[in-house]
């Protein structure tokens, strides 16, 4: 990796893993092109019973949630000015940007009339929660690209750097409003499925669950990401910073848990989780491994170790992934009456999108100042 | 007043003429894989209406056949129309819920949102659209009955003002004890334009009877109304916090300097 002090030299190390990721991306791209030309029936196992499948569940629902680290960090560091967490800000927001670009790609692939994707910009179906998701995700992705210009202009188009820096506070605030709205709206989509989604997941406040979980998964993702980046780039974020950060998650998760219990009790469906059905077991796995155990890790001494932080991150992220999968797939099985197993093509495209994201992250980290920027303290303020 | 159709399931003989009329009027191809009639009948992108054959037991416990026509119920407050973010589905004042293909993005939220799983997708097309019964809205606008209704030889259907039909349905089931005391579509999801009466309980005929009586769009209406205000309020709070915490940090920095000095 060329040091930043050196003149403009673009670099991208090629390692065996990266070759694999590149291959995966290439295969996925081929499938994507084939799908865009021939339609959805040829590549996916979607059907009239399962109009939404893996791409919506994983690429979109999970993608947006896992990218939630960006707005949470922006809130903590750039709006609340907790400069203490500044070392993680850039990488968290970069992950978020890449995440959203992948979500947009995933959405684009999933819609039947993809050349018509812009239609809701002019034909306003404003009674639809999806309308809000669409606008907010589009705007937020734009905002994130603009936010990134502050980093990009350190290297490219440097004369615009000051403009980008000056615009940052406004972008940050706008860049928190949009995700707050659409993170909850993704849950809000399911308000209509009152007779379809299993009652352990359907709730009149499902949007709150989506919002809170997208907030607490942020620090968890940062733990996973900094561990991986730490190994790859030998750049370690101090443990106390991460520990303090996941405490914020911990409190949010306690609120989530209490709200969840209250919600289930108030709708008289609390007992459903112990009746041994597939849904009940999936729900228990989600709650125990994704929420309860991580809360204990968070407030115990275990979180003072890198292993503890990594396990916390892994559990919480997987828990949120499982939650989104459960809402889109598990919770709909009973009312659908037919099972759905994604096709190989759907799996490869989903994996390929993740591979593209990882490669993009590596390239940007190696060519822009993402991980080390201590001298940047206060610039964004 | 919106138009509706009253279906008397006790009269249907299962000839399937209605499903043929539907295909002819709407120019839908014959579906090689899925029949429009019988035990395996299924709505698809080409079958906008089908007639299911059901083997059930009557009140005396005798096995009997019943034929159940299925098509879009044309909800008074349709979930599909409220779910569409591009207004591709719209409710007309005459009653039909109609589709504007050029507005459709193909996201299929309408299909997930429909409580009766009516809308279907053209999975085998390169640029697929969503399809469903439109109640032959062109005919309805002209004051004519939908194609399926007009060809029925058994007098299963009555077409007219929905509220009038509801009154009629009520009087029919009150007079004749063979009918179950339930009009399907009167209250389901806030009411539908197509309503059914039957002598066999609806759940035995494959009707989704456990649906909410609240119009589905009302589940999201409050949420969508609140959104802009929440967004604006949140923006104000964030801006306030931004300036407050920035100033607080400055002051604490200055104080620290003073102490050190």
Image (cartoon, coloured by chain):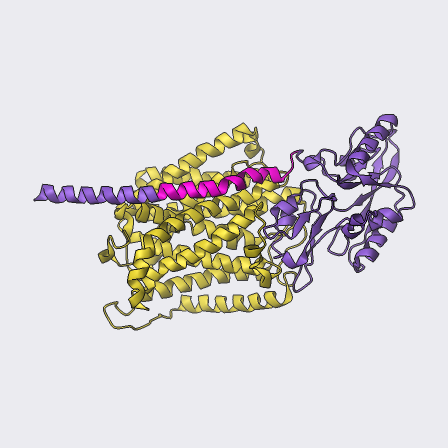
* Residue A140 visible in the displayed image: yes
Tell me if A339 is positioned left or right of A247 in this view. right
- Front in this rendered view, residue B201 or B176: B176
Q: Main secondary structure of the magenta part?
A: helix
Name which quarter of the figure residue B164 lies in.
Answer: top right
Count of picture labels: 0
From the image, which quarter does the N terminus of chain A lie in?
bottom left
Q: Residue furthest left?
A: B261
Q: Residue at x 83, y 47 (%)?
A: B145
**Chain A display color:** yellow
Name which quarter of the figure residue B114 lies in.
Answer: top right
Above or below for B22 versus B240: below
- Front in this rendered view, residue A143 or B50: A143
Location of residue B82 in the rendering, given as x and y in whole percent from the top left corner: 62, 45
- Front in this rendered view, residue B250 or A123: A123
Location of residue A82 in the rendering, given as x and y in whole percent from the top left corner: 28, 45
**Chain B display color:** purple
Location of residue A127 in the rendering, given as x and y in whole percent from the top left corner: 58, 45
Location of residue A193 in the rendering, given as x and y in whole percent from the top left corner: 61, 41
Residue B223 inside the magenta-drawn segment: yes
- Extent of the magenta region: B214-238
Residue A240 inside the magenta-drawn segment: no
Q: Residue at x 44, y 36 (%)?
A: A256
* Residue A303 visible in the displayed image: no
Q: Residue at x 48, y 55 (%)?
A: A138
Tell me if B11 is positioned left or right of A257 in this view. right
């Amino acid at each position: 990796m060329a040091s930043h002090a050196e003149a403009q030299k673009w670099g991208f190390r090629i390692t065996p893993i990266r070759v694999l990721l590149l291959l995966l991306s290439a295969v996925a791209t081929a499938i994507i092109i084939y799908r865009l030309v021939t339609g959805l029936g040829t590549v996916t196992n979607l059907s009239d019973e399962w109009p939404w499948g893996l791409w919506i569940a994983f690429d979109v629902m999970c993608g947006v949630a896992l990218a939630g680290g960006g707005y949470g960090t922006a809130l903590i560091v750039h709006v609340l000015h907790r400069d203490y967490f500044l070392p993680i800000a850039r990488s968290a927001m970069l992950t978020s940007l890449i995440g959203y670009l992948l979500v947009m790609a995933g959405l684009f692939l999933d819609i039947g009339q993809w050349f018509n994707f812009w239609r809701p910009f002019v034909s306003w179906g404003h009674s639809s929660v999806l309308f809000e998701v669409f606008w907010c995700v589009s705007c937020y992705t734009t905002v994130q690209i603009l936010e990134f210009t502050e980093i990009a202009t350190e290297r490219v188009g440097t004369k615009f750097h000051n403009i980008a820096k000056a615009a940052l506070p406004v972008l940050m605030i706008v860049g928190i409003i949009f995700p707050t709205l659409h993170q909850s709206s993704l849950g809000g989509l399911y308000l209509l499925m009152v007779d379809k989604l299993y009652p352990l997941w359907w709730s009149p406040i499902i949007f709150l669950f989506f919002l809170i979980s997208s907030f607490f998964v942020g620090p968890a993702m940062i733990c996973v990401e900094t561990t991986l980046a730490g190994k790859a780039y030998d750049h370690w974020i101090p443990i106390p910073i991460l520990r303090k950060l996941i405490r914020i998650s911990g409190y949010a998760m306690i609120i989530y848990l209490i709200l969840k219990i209250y919600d289930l009790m108030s709708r008289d469906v609390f007992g459903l989780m112990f009746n041994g059905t597939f849904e009940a077991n999936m729900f228990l796995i989600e709650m125990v491994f994704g929420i309860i155990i991580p809360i204990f890790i968070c407030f115990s001494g275990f979180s003072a170790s890198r292993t503890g932080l990594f396990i916390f991150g892994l559990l919480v992220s997987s828990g949120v992934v499982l939650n989104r999968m459960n809402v889109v797939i598990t919770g709909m099985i009973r009312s659908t009456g037919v099972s759905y197993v994604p096709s190989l093509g759907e799996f490869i495209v989903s994996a390929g999108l993740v591979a593209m994201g990882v490669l993009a992250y590596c390239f940007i980290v190696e060519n822009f100042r993402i991980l080390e920027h201590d001298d940047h303290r206060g610039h964004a303020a | 007043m919106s138009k509706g159709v009253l279906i008397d399931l006790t009269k249907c003989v299962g000839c399937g003429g209605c499903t043929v009329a539907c295909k002819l009027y709407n120019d839908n191809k014959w579906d090689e894989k899925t029949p429009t009639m019988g035990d395996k009948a299924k709505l698809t992108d080409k079958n906008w209406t089908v007639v299911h054959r059901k083997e059930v037991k009557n009140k005396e416990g005798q096995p009997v056949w019943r034929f159940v026509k299925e098509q879009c119920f044309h909800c008074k407050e349709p979930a599909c129309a409220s779910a569409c973010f591009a207004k591709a589905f719209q409710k007309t004042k005459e009653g039909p819920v109609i589709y504007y293909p050029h507005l459709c993005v193909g996201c299929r939220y309408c299909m997930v949102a429909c409580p009766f799983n009516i809308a279907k997708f053209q999975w085998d097309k390169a640029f697929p659209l969503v399809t469903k019964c439109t109640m032959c809205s062109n005919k309805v606008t002209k004051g004519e009955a939908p194609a399926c209704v007009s060809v029925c030889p058994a007098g299963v259907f009555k077409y007219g003002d929905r509220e009038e039909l509801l009154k009629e349905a009520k009087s029919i089931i009150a007079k004749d004890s063979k009918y179950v005391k339930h009009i399907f579509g009167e209250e389901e999801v806030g009411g539908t334009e197509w309503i059914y009466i039957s002598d066999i309980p609806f759940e035995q005929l494959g009707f989704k009877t456990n649906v909410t009586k609240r119009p589905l769009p009302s589940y999201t209406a409050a949420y969508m109304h609140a959104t802009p205000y929440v967004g604006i309020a949140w923006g104000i709070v964030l801006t306030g916090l931004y300036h407050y915490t920035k100033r607080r940090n400055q002051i604490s920095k200055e104080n620290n300097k003073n102490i050190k000095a």
